[in-house]
Image (cartoon, helix red, strand yellow):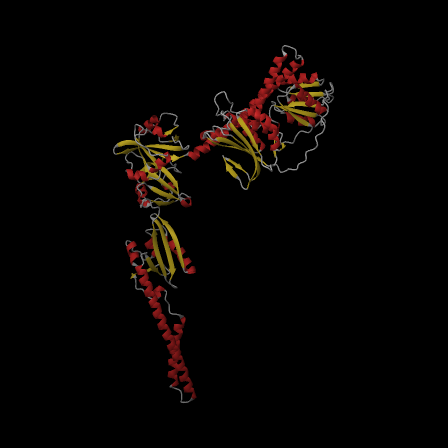
Amino acid sequence: MIKREPLSLPDLGIVLPQWARVAAVMVLGASAMLFGSLLLPPGLPRLGSVTAGITLACVAAAIAIRIQVTGRAQIMAVDLLNRFIERDATPSFVTDDDGRVHARNRAACVRFTDSEGETLAAILRMILANPSAVLYRLQCRARIDGNAREDVVTRRGHVRLAVHLMGEQGFLWRVEDFAERPQAGRGADTLPIPMITVGRTGAVLFMNEAARTLVGQRAKSLDRLFVSLPPVPGQINMLTTAEGPVPTLVAERQGPAGRTEIYFLPTSEGCPVHNASDFDLLPVAMLKVAASGEVLKTNRLAAELLGREVIEPTQLGQLMQGLGRPIADWLGDTFENRQSPKSEFLKLSREDREVFVQVTLSRVIEDGTPIVVAVLSDATELKTLEAQFVQSQKMQAIGQLAGGVAHDFNNLLTAISGHCDLLLLRHDQGDQDYGDLVQINQNANRAAALVSQLLAFSRKQTLRPEPIDLRDTLSDLTHLLNRLVGEKVTLTLSHDPVLKPIRADKRQLEQVLMNLVVNARDAMPQGGEIRIETEVETLEGPQNRDRATIPAGQYVTVRVCDEGVGIPSDKLQKVFEPFFTTKRTGEGTGLGLSTAYGIIKQTGGFIFVDSVPNRGTTFTLFFPAHDEIATERPAAEPKPAQTVAVHGEGVVLLVEDEAPVRAFASRALRLRGYTVLEAASAEEALQTLEDPELLVDVFVTDVVMPGMDGPSWVREALKKRPQVRVVFVSGYAEGAFEDTKPAVPNSVFLPKPFSLRQLTDTVHRQLH
């Protein structure tokens, strides 16, 4: 060891044991006894004293011999330790309990040649910000465990401090350096790009040499570096330096343990762009673009993001699109400083996949020539989330629009078909106008079917779910589906041997299957095979697919597969959007799949699509399996014979705000002999019922009206007339109103549009 102070055994913690002191006392005692025996008279006392003194002297001699052997062993151990530490390539120090350095090896003298501190904390202050706390923590652990070790992050890498307890008063310290973040043989501190490492709390953990040179000092937090926080990656931020604020282009990269690496490049005209080799090593995708729009240089990450090597000459407009104006104008504004730098989101011209980038342009000077540096950040995930949000908002808005349109159309169709029914009552089949009236009635029914599609899409229709066996449903549909597919297409059914029932609206489910089969037929103009497969699947855990999460459980799946032309990947996620179709103009409305999607979702299921161009498409439906397999249905009661409603046996209060609908319903009920009282609003109806002498048997009321709605005024009226029956009519779905309030007793729902017979039969059933 190369010693700075004389090194002694006590300095290394080698202390004579307690029994060495006892031996010295014994020697003194033996000497005293032998000397005292000379003063005693000859005889037995003198002999005993001499014997005791000789015995003590022998014991003391034995102890002295042991002390000498032990001392030599300790000196040999110290010598061996000195030789080992002196040859160690790791800087090593020997300190006392107060941290004073008593010795250091040659490696320590070379590594810390500029440090003249007397304590280890003072020596390590050149590499650690607060060495005293670290040394104290390690020293306490070494006293308990005999040794301790800790890795400390410094601006030049990792430093490993190790300490070993050498005795009661000595510690052996080793300081070992580890380089961090090698990049092609160069540490982060040698990167030509200013770079810092920031922790979760915004503390600056590391600044490389370029960053310290640019800033002019070692900053401890982000608020000492940037004028405004947080710094926005991909954009120009004002960096605080010793020379004043400097506009800086910022890029971020997430590091381990929640740390963030921030790179910044000054963009003032006096700061040149780095040379070609440094440019290619930048950890940010960047392009150099000339004033003409020609791409001069791309670094490695930019080439990876673009998906190809850029071969000069290439215009920037050939690599990306979607700016909304000529890219040349955008570049011109940057060159002329006509606008402050801001980011634009563009789509890369890649054929393999859809990639969006956030592009920021900055004007710099290179070799005396102004150019533009474009920084590219992958924004595909951000744009995907944005597109999903916009799509959900659009779907919600269209759903609300569809529900409102359906309500208004149902009122119109009720008036049209109702008055047509009134005309048909006055015309025989031989009448020349009878055929025209039938055509009006049929087209009104077709319009009602289209409106029901809108309600299905917006999920505002009324479903009548019931346990369904898919085998029976598909068997009943087979003859109709075979007629739909034609002669060129073969329809094949395949069922799971143990197929569980599902709970759904049979009529709506049939509509979904018909839509899917028709689409499969249209995808195979030259013919082929359509397969409908049913299967029971059990999901052990939640399954994520196409932005939907299928909970764990047992499901019945229905797959409709074809061998058609398929759907391109860029259109695959849009097939369930309303009015979107892959068919030619005039061949489809774009409501079929959106209607199917609405019905499946309202049923509580899921629908997914898989397609490979020129190989076919598969639609997969997931329905929760119905647990009540052995549910016994009540025996079907014999249908009563059709009887004509007895005329003049009831008083009906008709409440409808639409005058044409009210006129038709009033005439229809009067034709059946009912006494009809009319009201255009709920308030008018309640005013009519204020007469206690007035007897009313049935309320026929619209649900949605200006002012008080139907259920509200009916509940108020039933407080005094609890025996009155109620018929609610509406163009909305039955479950689309008053979901949170209890149902009205003795009430039924009649959806619009309804025919003359449907109205009169419903009123008749309520009375009887």
Q: Which of 73 and 423 is in front in this view?
A: 423
Residue 615 against residue 147 in the figure, above or below: above
Residue 267 spot, x, y in % from top left: 31, 35
| 37 up-or-down from 470: above or below | below
Along the line of sight, which residue is nearer the eye, 695 or 316? 316
Residue lying furthest left? 368
Q: Report whether residue 508 is seen.
A: no
Q: Which of 535 and 28 is in front in this view?
A: 535
What residue do we see at 67% from left, 29% from top? 744
Residue 308 appears in which quarter of the rendering? top left
Position of 2 with respect to 735 (left or right) is left
* Quarter of the N terminus within the rendering: bottom left
Front-most of residues 516 and 398: 516
Q: Is residue 654 above or below residue 319?
A: above
The percent coordinates of residue 694 (x first, y second) are: 73, 21
Image height of 176 relative to 605, above or below: below
**Residue 674 shown left or right of residue 704 in the figure:** right
Residue 608 drawn at (x, y percent) = 52, 33
Q: Is residue 57 left or right of residue 735?
A: left
* Quadrant of the drawing holding the C terminus: top right
Q: How many marks?
A: 0
Q: Can residue 573 be seen in this view?
A: yes
Residue 570, percent from left and from top:
45, 30
Q: Residue furthest bottom?
A: 42
